[in-house]
Image (spheres, rainbow, N blue to C red):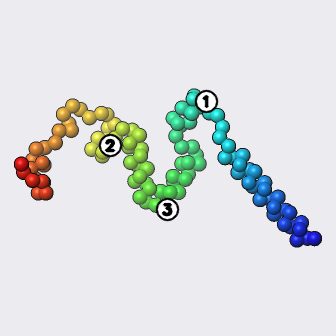
């Protein structure tokens, strides 16, 4: 008899767990204003904690987070640290670089 009671308790706990997970998995309606507010806030305290743990466990993740922050700020390379857009003509390539490529055939 005690085996049946124990089995019933375990089955009840499993069913409660499944019910709880199904309630958590249900989508809910979010207004546009609330979505925009959450998107601007960025990661919360829990997300920041997870990022901190990930940086500690995987040093390459720290670099990835830095790159993601740079991309959010509009910086695609390390030369431009100011966050300002590049000035006109700054992205011109030096013609000597094109000629120095040994794998390129001269036409």
Q: Quadrant of the N terminus?
A: bottom right
Q: How far across and down, in percent of the image, does residue 17 sit?
A: 75, 55
Give the residue at the far right of this rendering.
Answer: 1
In the visual, does 6 lie left or right of 106?
right
- Tell me the tag on residue 57: 3
Q: Residues within 10 Å of mark 2 (few under 14, many from 20)?
A: some
Identify the residue at image location x=66%, y=37%: 28
Q: Which numbered tag is attached to residue 97?
A: none
Name which quarter of the figure residue 85 lies in. top left
Q: Say whether disc 1 or disc 2 marks the residue closer to the N-terminus.
A: 1
Q: Would you name the residue on which mark 2 appears?
A: 76
Left or right relative to 72: residue 41: right
Label drawn at residue 31: 1
Q: Nearer the viewer, mark 2 or mark 3?
A: 2
* Residue placed most toward the observer, 37 or 98: 98
Instruction: Say which element carries label 3.
Output: helix
**Which residue lies at the image location 86% right of the left edge and 67% below the top edge?**
6
Kindly indicate whether the residue at mark 3 contacts the one at mark 2 (C-beta within 8 angstroms): no
| Mark 2 vs 3, N-terminal side | 3
Between the C-alphas of marks 2 and 3, the distance is 26 Å
Q: Report helix, strand or loop for mark 1.
A: loop
Residue 89 appears at what percent x and percent y? 18, 34
Task: Tell which of 78 and 22 is nearer to you.
Answer: 22
* Tags 1 and 3 touching, CB below 8 Å: no
User: What SS does tag 2 mark?
Assistant: loop
Determine crowd level at label 1: few under 14, some 14-19, many 20+ residues with C-alpha closer than 10 A.
few
Residue positioned 39% across, 38% down in the render: 73
Distance of label 1 from label 3 (alpha carbons): 37 Å
Give percent across and percent down for residue 63.
40, 53
Counting from the top left corner in percent of width and height, residue 29 is at: 64, 34
Q: Nearer the viewer, mark 1 or mark 3?
A: 1
Residue at 86% x, 63% y: name it.
Answer: 8
């Amino acid at each position: 008899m005690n085996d049946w009671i124990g089995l019933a308790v375990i089955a009840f706990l499993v069913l409660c767990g499944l019910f709880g997970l199904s309630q958590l998995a249900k989508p809910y309606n979010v207004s546009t204003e609330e979505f925009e507010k959450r998107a601007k806030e960025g990661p919360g305290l829990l997300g920041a904690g997870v990022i901190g743990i990930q940086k500690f466990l995987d040093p390459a993740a720290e670099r990835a987070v830095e790159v993601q922050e740079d991309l959010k700020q509009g910086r695609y390379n390390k030369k431009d640290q100011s966050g300002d857009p590049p000035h006109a003509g700054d992205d011109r390539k030096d013609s000597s670089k094109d000629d120095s490529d040994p794998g390129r055939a001269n036409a």
